[in-house]
Image (cartoon, rainbow, N blue to C red):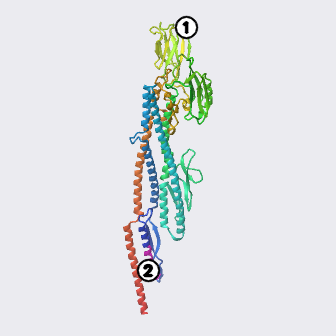
Amino acid sequence: MDSFGIGISGLNAAQKAFEIIGNNIANAATDGFHRQRVNLSPAYSAQVGSVLLGGGVDLASVTRIIDGLLQKEMFKQASSMEQISKELTTLRMVESAFGELSGRTGLSTTIDEFFNALQDLSAHPVEVIWQNQAVTAAETMAGQFRTMGDFLTSLETQIRLEAENAIEEVNVLVARIADLNDSIKRHEIGSGQANNLRDQRDQCITELARLISAETQSREYGVVDVSVSGIPVVTSTSAFALEVGLQENLGLGIGVAGESNYTVNAEGGRVGALLTLKNDSLADIRSDLDSLAGAIIRQINEYHVQGVGSEGSFTGLAGWPMSSETLADFAPPVSNGNIYVRVTNTSTGAITRTAVPVDASTDTLTTVATALTAITGLTASVSDSRLNIQADANYEFDFLPCVLPSPTASDFTGATSPPTVSVSGIYTGTTNQTLTFTVSGTASVGNGTLQITVTDGDGSTVTTLNIGSGYAAGDRLDLGNGIRITLSAGDLVDGNTFEVDVFADTDTSGVLAAAGMNAFLTGSNASDMAVHSDIVTTPGRLATALGADMTDNSNALRMEALRNQAITDLNSMTPGEFYRRLTADIGQQVAIKQIHQDNVEAMVQSIANQQDEISGVNINEEAAQILIFEQMFKAMAKYLSTIQSSLSTVMDII
């Protein structure tokens, strides 16, 4: 190369360096821009004789200053930070809505007020004002449950919409990345690295990572393949759109548009946060809230169905519509057992109790209705999957567990004039029993050493009663379990017996409560919990009594005691304990995610600082580079001027 070629190569190199430095300075504040550097190399050398002459300078390349591993780590951490931030923001909304940890009035208070109202009612079971108070407290509690359920439903709907919007943004970015891949490939096949285009593409990948965790794979000619959650979305210059959908188990997921095959395991970014919230965090909160509401509904109704209020026994009852008449399909499930129906003939005063066997695996509401219709005084039917029971004229029915006024069976063989036995009371035991009363001694009531030994169904002795000397006919004898008997004058023979059926539960199958018969609360979860319309319109239907005179407070006390009862469906916790655990779990999640967010933010800041040190534009350094190349440019210009002057002198001599 001649001297002029050497000088021109130096000027060109300096000029290109000015352009690169200018581009750096112009993009000093541009997100995702990586500083570029000019790489110069000696030009072709020519040998003249034994001397190797230089040929000037070539612009070898323009290098984008980037640490690939650091860039991938930034993608990963930016994705994590966006996910944690979104989850934290949403859980704080939930925490605020539940209101417990912020000290505001919340669901816990309304539950306590409901049980307090039942306690007050137990002291005044037949007074309308206290009945109304209990109904109002129940409506307030149910309303608070519905508010919380509706809030979670609304939040889940909002999350679904946000996920769809986020996936639209993902699709836009994916298409942009594919287009940039195409542009980069076309440029680099023919003319080296397309650094600015690479920066634009990497910035798109960073934005994509903020939406969903993205993995990249470098290919030749600067092309990068991108996949999210194992789904390839960019392959070379082709893009594949995503969509949001629900799996069969109603889990929110993402998949390739049009294929209807969704994965719920997407992680990272806003999309990962939304899927985690919908499928895990909020699903668990809703499940716990629904479990609490369902447990209160079931337990209250299982007690309520067995009692009566000041309105007395029933002439008709209707359940609520069931999704299926088959008992095996009921949720919560019912079990094998018996329904004990007490029927009163209002004309004669005669009272009977009949057991209706239930086979949970084979029976339907229709077979139950058929068995109920077989009871004298009752007619039952099923309409629109609702069980209906009607009393015939001059009959009433209920499911009270109080004992019948006379023994269930007796054997007074040998007694010339046996006494009349009267039974009363409400059994306080925990399981249904047949109590057997066996006479010891032979004498008339109130004389001799007559005794009665009482044994339960297991043959264990409950108590021994003195009905001989010292006992006056007609005196009440207390068995110590809520049951009392009296004997009139008469004679008994050693070995005489009689039996009394006592009941702790008159629906051991759970069918009546499940079908909504004589229910206090309706619904099955937080979103549909309500007070039965019959109770709202007629508060006297609120079943406070279990006794035959229907004025006691036993059922009100039993329902109020649920406040402190460990319930199996609530992980053997009381309703209050379960709800406090629920709110504490939310608070704990918020605290943990706050710590996690702080840690990730610190990590992201550290990575950003490292990236800035490596790839960022330092104006002072760029100014120093300008001075270097400015001096180079001036020197090369002086060099060319000197060559020109020398040539002119030679030409003048010639």
Disc with the residue nearer the chain's start (1 vs 2): 2
Task: Determine the residue positioned at 40% across, 51% down.
Answer: 599
Q: Which residue is at the front of the view, 461 or 45?
A: 461
Q: Which residue is at the front of the view, 434 or 527?
A: 527
Instruction: Give neighbour class at mark 1: few <14, some 14-19, many 20+ (Cα, 10 Å).
Output: some
Q: x%, y% of residue 331?
A: 56, 35
Q: Secondary structure at mark 2?
A: helix
Q: Which residue is at the front of the view, 217 or 92?
A: 92
Q: Is residue 43 above or below residue 428?
A: below
Q: Is residue 291 magenta?
A: no
Q: CA distance from mark 1 to mark 2?
A: 141 Å
Residue at image mark 2? 7
Q: Secondary structure at mark 1?
A: loop
What amino acid does circle 1 point to?
Ala
What amino acid does circle 2 point to?
Gly
Q: Which mark is residue 123?
A: none
Q: x%, y% of residue 458?
A: 52, 20
Q: Quadrant of residue 117?
A: top left
Q: Answer yes or no: do the residues labelled 1 and 2 have beta carbons within 8 Å?
A: no
Q: Is residue 8 magenta?
A: yes
Q: x%, y% of residue 116?
A: 42, 31
Task: Determine the residue positioned at 43% across, 80% down.
Answer: 7
Q: Quadrant of residue 495?
A: top right
Residue range corresponding to the magenta coloring: 1-16
Disc count in the image? 2
Residue 112 lies left or right of residue 232; in this view the side is left
Instruction: Mark yes or no: residue 593 visible.
Output: yes
Residue at image mark 1? 415
Instruction: Give neighbour class at mark 2: few <14, some 14-19, many 20+ (Cα, 10 Å).
Output: many
